[in-house]
Image (cartoon, grey):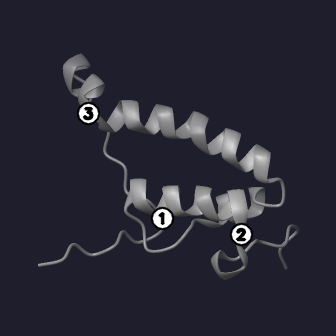
Amino acid sequence: MALVKLVDEADATGLVKEVYDDILRSRNLERVPNYWKALAHQPDFLAATWHKLKTVVDFFNGSNAVASGLQVEYEPSVPRRSEPS
């Protein structure tokens, strides 16, 4: 049994929906990971945490990492959306 009720994507509104949409779009995921759904009870905290972590993830996946010679391979626990053919 979960200790925290998760905020489902279908129930997300306002700031929570905006953050969920950004997570899905920027990480190319099929669904929002449960970690974010647990934080969604506090929308401001969800948004602040996502924006901080997104900056770090973007660094390691972007040109800064390539320029620094870093190679970070990350496979999310949530399936990515399939690319259209």
Above or below — where is 58 with respect to 15?
above
Residue 64: horizontal and vertical position, in percent? 29, 23
Q: Residue at x 50, y 56 (%)?
A: 22
Q: CA distance from mark 3 to mark 1?
A: 19 Å
Question: Dot 2: within a 10 Å radius of its alpha carbon, few (fewer than 14), some, or many (20 or more) residues?
Answer: few
Residue reaching furthest to the top: 68
In the rendered image, which residue does mark 1 sit on?
77
Choose the circle earlier in sequence order: 2 or 1.
Answer: 2
Looking at the image, is mark 3 or mark 1 earlier in the sequence?
3
- Name the side, left or right, on which 7 lies relative to 17: right
Q: CA distance from mark 2 to mark 3?
A: 36 Å
> Mark 3 Cα within 10 Å, few/some/many (few <14, many 20+)?
few
Q: Which residue is mark 3?
A: 71
Q: Looking at the picture, how far across and down is residue 48, in whole percent? A: 69, 39
Q: Mark 3: which amino acid? A: Gln
| Foreground pick, 44 / 66 | 44
Residue 16 x %, y %:
69, 60
Residue bearing the label numbered 2: 13
Residue type marked 1: Ser
Give the distance between the C-alpha atoms of the residues marked 2 and 1, in whole angstroms: 24 Å
Residue 15 locus on image (x, y percent): 70, 56
The local secondary structure at tag 1 comes to loop
Quadrant holding the C terminus: bottom left
Q: In what quadrant of the picture does the N terminus appear?
A: bottom right
Few, some or many residues within 10 Å of mark 1 (<14, 14–19, 20+)? few
At label 2, the amino acid type is Thr
Using the image as rendered, state which of residue 73 and residue 5 is in the foreground: 5
Circle 3 SS class? loop
Residue 49 falls in which quadrant of the image?
top right
Determine the residue located farthest toward the left in the rendered image: 85
Residue placed farthest to the right in the image? 3
**The label number, if any, that marks residue 62 in the structure image:** none
